[in-house]
Amino acid sequence: MTDVTAVGPAGSEELEGTVFDIGYQSYAGPREGRSRARWAVYKDGLRSALGLGRGPRAKVIPWFFITILGVIGLVMALIAGAVNTYVGPNAAEVLDLPSHSDYYGIASIVFFVFAAVGGPEMLCPDRRDGVINLYLVRPLTGSDYISARWLAFFTVMLSVAWLPQLLLLAGLTLSDANPGDYLLENWLDIPRLLTAGLAMAAYTTSLALFSASFTTRRAYASVFLVGLFVITTPFTTGLASQLAEDYEGTAGAWVSMFNLSNIPVHVNDLIFGEVSLITSVAPAGEFSGWILIGWYLLWTLVPAGLLWMRYRKLTP
Amino acid sequence: MSALLIAENLTKHYDDDVALDDVSFDISDGITGVLGENGAGKSTAFKIFLGLLQPTSGSATILGENASESVAVRSKLGYMPEHDCLPSTVSAAEFLTHVAEVSGLPPTRARIRAADTLRHTGLFEERYRAMGGYSTGMKQRVKLAQALVHDPAIVFLDEPTAGLDPVGREEMLALVRKTHREFGISVLFSSHLMVDVERTCDRIIVLRGGRLVQSGDLEQFTKDAETVFIEVDDNRDRLVVALEKRGVLVTSDGHGLYIEGSDESVYDKVRSALVESEAPLRRMAPRRGELTELFRRDGEAGQRDREPDPRDGDADPGNGKAT
């Protein structure tokens, strides 16, 4: 028990109070079990990916990439707006300036590098610091944990994929002389850009987290992923072109399929019905849509499934 | 008193290695020490009860549920691992709030519980600092706090005094006692330091090479190791001879004589020996033995009785380590 005396303003009575230490109180409130546990891990994943509740250093990398991706969308919108204003209505479309269908192709490398840097943050520290042991002795299974983490990073990647596209849409709409007409004419771009964003986010999330599940060091996972996304591009592009020139058949196209940066962009092209800038020279574009979608699903679902299996084993 | 935790013929194999071999025991409310050297099977037993490992055979029941099948029961369990488990970039307050939510508490209540638990474990002032800057003692307190934050029915403490200096160790043992006596949470406390268990626990379980060696109330163990201490002014050697003639086992430490056992017959023999040796008695008192005494004797007897077993290691019970 502690006696506390508070002195009031001059002339007022002195107030006296007593603070009681009521000691340890047992918890008698609700226990919301697995659903609360999954939500907590999901929420923590979002905070980790964006550096929220962490020091300034943890915020630098995610917000740098988010800004870059936003700036790409904004610049595309500003250019289209300027062209429409100074050249004439619909000039951006007539001049075939980069638009929604091209955005993911243009921004894909930045998007992939962000996934490579942010994905390992979801899993590596928990295993390196041993926090995973504290999760798994609570009402949470290995499957719950990895599903929550996957969804958290997917949410971040989806937001990062959609935000610049929505900026671009706003820019294109507002720069048009008749914004209402623009939206009516181009409304299909909205479900297309949302679906293409989903495809980009699911692919990068699965590959990034699957690679991160093999190491406790974020740097190793990030370097491996950057290598995977960035280095496969010049390597496969050169080899695929050479094979396509030297041999008949689909050998060059198949090599081109291993350009990991292009896999979701081919799906983006199918969704928009146009070939984007970076896939226009890829021999893999010769394949039918079903093969391209199947290949995308293989590279998205298999890593996600293997990742789930790895973590499922952590609890009996 | 109903058992909180029951092991029935619990066996765990890792390929050819036997971590637990047909172990059965039950634990009720209180502080129970699990003693054993490294590799005795303490951590394996903990992990089975926490649902992290599936037993090869046998069953582990905790709070009436099968430990490896019920996920829900884990919201009533707490675990303080031996090794590091704290993220360095997060504050203790934030981390505890998060793990309380993972234990199923709603966010507002989790925040209140986190602050309360940090106050009870002596970290209230430091709660907003990133844990990377904490001392070993502070980290151990956070580890304990995260195990208690959701008010479990039973908490598993794996070597809670590991790496602590003598003062930190005292404080941690006091917190462990407080956990049961003030917070009402049952404690399962593993250690290879007998003295920690002796000063903290109500009951003990001793594992050696994956097998159960002893289990029961600590008081009974120390009573078994009770001796009678005698100090005389003169004729000490004659008294020793008189005692030995009566079949009494006597040891000496230079100041006095220690006689094993403390029942009525021992006192009768001492009285007769004192009369016969004409040794003037200065002091005679029963003295409760330490666990180390008991296990030293058991260890010596065991060493004579059994073949050498490489899994027994080279722990020295004389240094306060379990055999």
Image (tube, coloured by chain):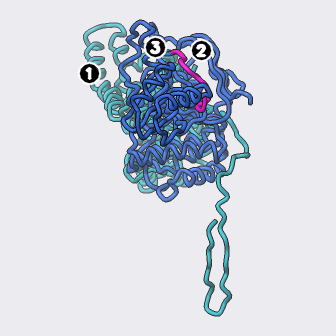
- Residue B298 % position (x, y): 48, 19
- Residue B192 % position (x, y): 45, 29
What residue is pinned by disc 2?
B10
> Front-most of A122 and A187?
A122
What amino acid type is highlighted by mark number 3? Gly
Give the alpha-carbon distance from disc 2 to disc 3, as whole Å: 23 Å
Can residue B98 be spotted in the picture?
A: yes
Residue plotted at (43% across, 47% down): B168
Q: Determine crowd level at label 2: few under 14, some 14-19, many 20+ residues with C-alpha closer than 10 A.
A: many
Q: Secondary structure at mark 2?
A: strand
Give the alpha-carbon distance from disc 3 to disc 1, as whole Å: 74 Å
- Residue A204 % position (x, y): 45, 30
Is residue B260 rendered to the left or right of residue A97? right
The chain that hosts pointer 1 is A
- Is residue B143 inside the magenta stretch? no
Colour chain A is painted in? cyan
Q: Earlier in the sequence, mark 2 or mark 3?
A: 2
Look at the image and give the residue range highlighted in magenta.
B211-220
Tell me whether the residue at label 3 lies in contact with that at label 1, contact meaning CB atoms closer than 8 angstroms. Answer: no
